[in-house]
Amino acid sequence: MTDARSESTVVRGGAETDDDRSAAGVPTEGGVPGGEAGRGPDDALGGVVGGVPGVPGGSPETEAETEVAVRERKAARRELTAAVLLALVGAAIVLSVAGRTWAEGTAPVHGSHIAVAASGNSINKAVSAFALLGLAGALAVLATRTIGRAVVGALVLLAGIGVTVLAVQGASDTTALDSEAASKAAVEGVRAVDVTHAIWPWFAAVGGVLILLAGLFVLIRGRRWPGMSNRYEAPAGQAAAVKRGPSTNADLWNALDRGEDPTR
């Protein structure tokens, strides 16, 4: 009888010890921490999962890296857009004024005067050619990367320099006007008189400067800009987190069992 009562007391004492352990949050025989019943693996980890949205095992450091990468990509795209717009606007200005009258005058013919005029294309057709090169370069910037983009930037820069120089020269040029005067007078050597120059060459020079700035911008900053093919790629920090993070709750528990940090 005494032995039976002693065994019963020992059993009850053991049960009380297990209850006490469960209440204190110490793992019991079932392996589930006390007070954690009904909680999933993610809750048991104390919120270590979710540092990166949608990526198991993300940490605050990884999330910060991802945010920095996203901000850098947005800034790079704004710079790319600005460079392309500069070149497009500059080329549009040049092409719109190249066909206008840049110089006017008269040709003396047998005591009378015949009005003559010369457009920007008549003075120098290379103005429009350089503007078209700048326009094509602006589109090529979107489709190139690194070295190819640097080459395109150099071509756009040269196009801008060419437009600017030729436009400034055309603001005081009379060669084309003299040729027009000789043609209308049908007399070789006739020169135009009462020559006046319009303001359009200076508009073309402004357009050339815009193209020049776009090419310089591409040369300096273009290598860090994204291309068309990686528009929808994930940021580098998030891609790395996806690659190295556990993909299931079972993987999280296995990492903990191995003594590894599932957030790394």
Image: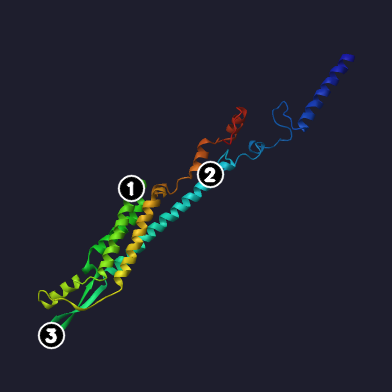
The answer to whether one can see residue 54 in this image is no
Where disc 2 sits, the SS reads helix
Dot 3 crowding, Cα within 10 Å, few <14, some 14–19, many 20+: few
- Disc 2 marks which amino acid? Glu
Please provide percent x and percent y for residue 192: 18, 77
Q: Which residue is mark 1?
A: 148
Query: Spatial distance from mark 3 to mark 1, Cα to Cα?
Result: 61 Å
Decide: is 58 above or below 78: above
Q: Along the polypeptide, which appears first: circle 3 or circle 2? A: 2
Pick whichever, 122 or 248, lies toward us.
122
Pick whichever, 28 or 84, lies toward us.
84
- Disc 3 marks which amino acid? Gly
Please provide percent x and percent y for residue 218: 37, 53
Decide: is 113 above or below 169: below
- Disc 1 marks which amino acid? Gly
Residue at 32%, 53% (x, y): give it. 154
Q: Which residue is mark 2?
A: 65
Dot 2 crowding, Cα within 10 Å, few <14, some 14–19, many 20+: some
Q: Which residue is mark 3?
A: 111
Q: Along the polypeptide, which appears first: circle 3 or circle 1? A: 3
| 222 lies left or right of 4 | left
Where disc 3 sits, the SS reads loop
Q: In the rendered picture of this protein, how many numbered marks are placed on residues?
A: 3
Query: Spatial distance from mark 3 to mark 2, Cα to Cα?
Result: 82 Å
Q: Along the polypeptide, which appears first: circle 2 or circle 1? A: 2
